[in-house]
Structure formats: C-alpha cells, structure tokens
C-alpha cells in the first residue's frame, strides 16, 4: 500500500481552489442553488450547510490543540499519514471526479433547512459562514507549519475511533470538501 504524504502547500492550493469554486457558486440563481436533482437529494445550499456543520465541530478542537502545541523553528514540509488515518481519508477522497462510496450522513451532520423558506438572505448567510469557517481552516493549516504537529491528536467528529495529527485532520477535511464539490457538480450537472 502506497504512503500518503501530505504537505501544507498542497493543502492550501486545494483549499484555495475549493473556496474559488464556492465563490463561483455564489453567483448562481437562487433556484439553481435550492433545487435538488430529485426528491431525496440535497440541493447546493444544503451541501454547503452540511460542510458548515462538519467544520464547525472541528473549529474549537483545532483552536484548543493550537494552545497546547509547542512551537518549532521549522516544521516538517511533508507528513506521512498513519495507516488507519490513511484508510479513513481515502474513504472521503473522490477518484477521477467520482465519489467512491456513498455514505449515509449521521443525523448530527444533516442540514436541517426548510427548503420552502430559503430566502436569498439565508442563502447568503450560509455562504458567509462557509467562507468564514474555511478561512479558519486555511489559517490553521498555515499556523501548523511552525508547530510540533505530533504532540496533539484531534478526535474526529465521529468520535475517538478516529483521531488525527493535524496534517491528517486537514487532509481528511479537504477530502471531505472535495467529495462534496463532486456532489455539487452532480447536482448542477
């Protein structure tokens, strides 16, 4: 099994690409953003709200980790993910623009939006939350460059069955974002 080597530079590039894509989505008509492809599917705004919920769980965990993590003169430019974490990350990562495994969303991550009352103001608020939260992620990736990232583990949003060192956590979050960008392409396609 090949290693999963992650770098903060690659992670920042991918996050910038996703943020730019979401900025493009923001220019679409409200009807495009709120119309699902079929009755049991999410619409674009629901996908973004799901991403807001998911990252919202990680924000305080990352903030707390940074308060406990010692600073180093220069952090490693590459990080090799551990086997179990690599497996979990791979489950999120889309391959060639396709989501490999369809997964049932846990209730705590479901976007509970009233589709009938999704005003432009509510849609704008969801986009703003997305940009604020993912600016936090970008800042966290940048701050991690001069931290000893092997000192603290982050418990995943699904619980202690999965815990991550910071670079693994960022990779998981990015693969989750990329997975849902594929889903948005499917919705709009």
Image (tube, rainbow, N blue to C red):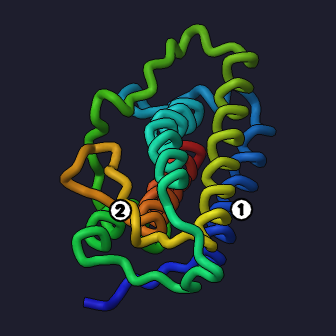
Residue closest to the far top: 117
Estimate the x, y position of residue 61 in percent, counting from the top left.
Answer: 45, 45
Residue closest to the far bottom: 2
Estimate the x, y position of residue 103 in percent, counting from the top left.
Answer: 27, 48
Which mark, by number, is residue 164? Answer: 2
Where residue 168 sits, quadrant-wise, is bottom left
Residue 155 as seen in the image, left or right of residue 114 = left
Residue at coordinates 75% horizontally, 38% vertically from top-left? 26
Q: Which of 41/17 is in front?
A: 17
Which mark, by number, is residue 16? Answer: 1
Mark 2 or 1: in front is 2
| Residue 92, above or below 27 | below
Residue at coordinates 40% horizontally, 72% vertically from top-left? 150
Locate the N terminus by quadrant: bottom left
| Local SS, label 2 | strand
Which mark, by number, is residue 161? Answer: none
- Density class for disc 1 (Cα within 10 Å; few <14, some 14-19, many ≥20) is some
- Density class for disc 2 (Cα within 10 Å; few <14, some 14-19, many ≥20) is many
Say whether residue 104 is visible: yes
Residue 189 as seen in the image, left or right of residue 100 = right
Where residue 21 sits, quadrant-wise, is bottom right
Say whether residue 37 is visible: no
Residue at coordinates 61% horizontally, 77% vertically from top-left? 10
Estimate the x, y position of residue 81 in percent, counting from the top left.
Answer: 36, 77
| Local SS, label 1 | helix
Q: CA distance from mark 2 to mark 1?
A: 22 Å
Where residue 20 sits, quadrant-wise, is bottom right
User: In the rendered structure, which disc, 2 or 1, sits on the residue that comes first in sequence?
Assistant: 1
């Amino acid at each position: 099994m090949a290693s999963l080597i992650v770098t903060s530079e690659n992670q920042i590039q991918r996050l910038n690409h996703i943020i730019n894509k979401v900025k493009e989505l923001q220019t679409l008509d409200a009807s495009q953003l709120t119309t699902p492809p079929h009755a049991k599917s999410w619409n674009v705004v629901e996908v973004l709200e799901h991403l807001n919920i998911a990252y919202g769980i990680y924000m305080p965990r990352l903030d707390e980790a940074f308060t406990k993590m010692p600073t180093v003169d220069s952090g490693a430019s590459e990080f090799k993910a551990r086997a179990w974490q690599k497996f979990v990350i791979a489950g999120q990562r889309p391959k060639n623009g396709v989501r490999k495994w369809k997964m049932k969303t846990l209730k705590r991550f479901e976007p509970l939006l009233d589709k009938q009352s999704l005003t432009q103001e509510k849609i704008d608020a969801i986009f703003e939350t997305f940009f604020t939260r993912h600016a936090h992620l970008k800042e966290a990736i940048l701050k991690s460059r001069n931290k000893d990232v092997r000192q603290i583990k982050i418990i995943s949003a699904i619980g202690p069955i999965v815990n991550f060192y910071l670079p693994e956590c960022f990779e998981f979050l990015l693969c989750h974002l990329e997975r849902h960008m594929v889903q948005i392409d499917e919705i709009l396609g």
